[in-house]
Image (cartoon, rainbow, N blue to C red):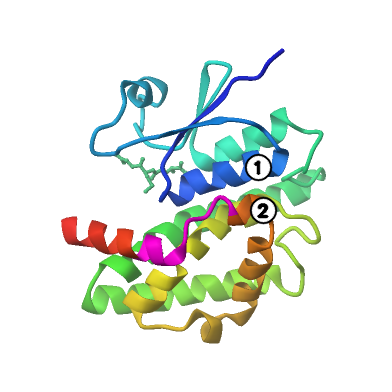
């Protein structure tokens, strides 16, 4: 059966980047439909009536929402190539735990570093560095979070590498000094085509985030 795969996409969304990476890891052909969040398409309302957010993966007409759920769905459906989750139940649970940690901590805290001012920003900066250091100790000496294989936690976190220039510039910090091993991990991930082709240029993201900040 021919597979129909469509992604309701947004170039700057770290959540959409996760899905693009997973699809590329699996070598799946798909149609990307860029959404305009100021003028959402009827298809987006239809496919994600609960959150009305991107990304949405539409597989043979059926929608799957929420980036981490989509990545796991992709791994379940296209199991034969490039597994993103380990097979052992305990290791799977660990990967999900860290992906959930990234979801709960990095987006919100990072956003306060590039968007907020003064004390809020100072506190967020401290918290973000703490989170990054914790993640750094979790990756340890391994090439990727799950060991030798690129997987769910890497997919969850690496899109935020596109924020690094904005975080450093707006937050006046040096991530290479604060967490060199995490930066080394990110550069390792960027050597994969699936990642480098899915992440926009850091400077372009910085300009975009400045625009968003002005509008807020
Ligand atoms: C978050 C998606 C999201 O925030 C996921 O997929 O993991 N938990 C979800 N999408 C944003 C764009 S990225 O900043 C979005 O669609 N926003 C539009 C809106 O909230 O109206």
Q: Position of residue 53 (x, y in %)?
A: 37, 36
- Res 216 seen here: no
Q: Give how far across and how far down residue 10 sits, in percent.
A: 41, 42
At a point 41% along the width and 77% down the height, the residue shown is: 168
**Separation of marks 1 and 2 at Cα, in angstroms:** 8 Å
Does ligand 1 reach within 8 Å of label 1's beta carbon?
no
Percent position of residue 56, x then y: 47, 32
Residue 59: where, in percent of width, then height? 57, 22
- Identify the residue position indicated by label 2 in the image: 193
Furthest-left residue in this view? 215
Q: Quick one: quadrant of the C terminus?
A: bottom left
| Tag 1–tag 2 contact (CB < 8 Å) | yes
Magenta range: 197-206
The quarter of the image holding the N terminus is top right
Residue beneath the point at 57% across and 35% down: 70
Q: Residue at x 70, y 28 (%)?
A: 77
Q: Is residue 38 visible?
A: yes
For residue 55, which quarter of the picture?
Answer: top left
Whether residue 43 sits left or right of residue 5 in the image: it is left
The mark found on residue 24 in the picture is 1
Residue at the (24%, 78%) spot, across then down: 119
- The quarter holding residue 150 reads bottom right
Q: How many marks?
A: 2
Could you tell me which secondary element the residue under label 2 belongs to? helix
Q: Dividing the image into four quarters, tell me where ligand 1 lies.
A: top left
For residue 200: magenta? Answer: yes
Local crowd at mark 2 within 10 Å, few (<14), some, or many (≥20)?
A: few
Q: Classify residue 163 as left or right of residue 211.
A: right
């Amino acid at each position: 059966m021919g597979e129909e795969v469509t992604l309701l996409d947004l170039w700057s969304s770290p959540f959409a980047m996760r899905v693009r990476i997973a699809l590329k890891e699996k070598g799946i052909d798909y149609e990307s439909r860029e959404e305009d969040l100021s003028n959402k398409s009827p298809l987006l309302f239809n496919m994600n009536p609960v959150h009305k957010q991107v990304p949405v993966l539409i597989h043979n007409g059926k929608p799957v929402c929420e980036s981490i759920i989509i990545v796991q769905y992709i791994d379940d459906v296209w199991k034969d190539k490039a597994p993103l989750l380990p097979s052992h139940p305990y290791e799977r649970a660990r990967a999900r735990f860290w992906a959930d940690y990234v979801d709960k901590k990095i987006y919100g805290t990072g956003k306060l570093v590039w968007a907020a001012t003064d004390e809020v920003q100072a506190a967020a900066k401290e918290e973000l560095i703490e989170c990054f250091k914790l993640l750094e100790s979790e990756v340890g000496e391994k090439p990727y979070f799950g060991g030798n294989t690129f997987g769910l936690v890497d997919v969850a976190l690496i899109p935020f590498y596109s924020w690094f220039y904005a975080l450093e510039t707006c937050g006046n910090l040096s991530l290479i000094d604060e967490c060199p091993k995490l930066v080394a991990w990110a550069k390792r991930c960027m050597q994969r085509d699936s990642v480098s082709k899915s992440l926009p240029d850091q400077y372009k993201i910085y300009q975009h985030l400045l625009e968003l900040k002005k509008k807020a």
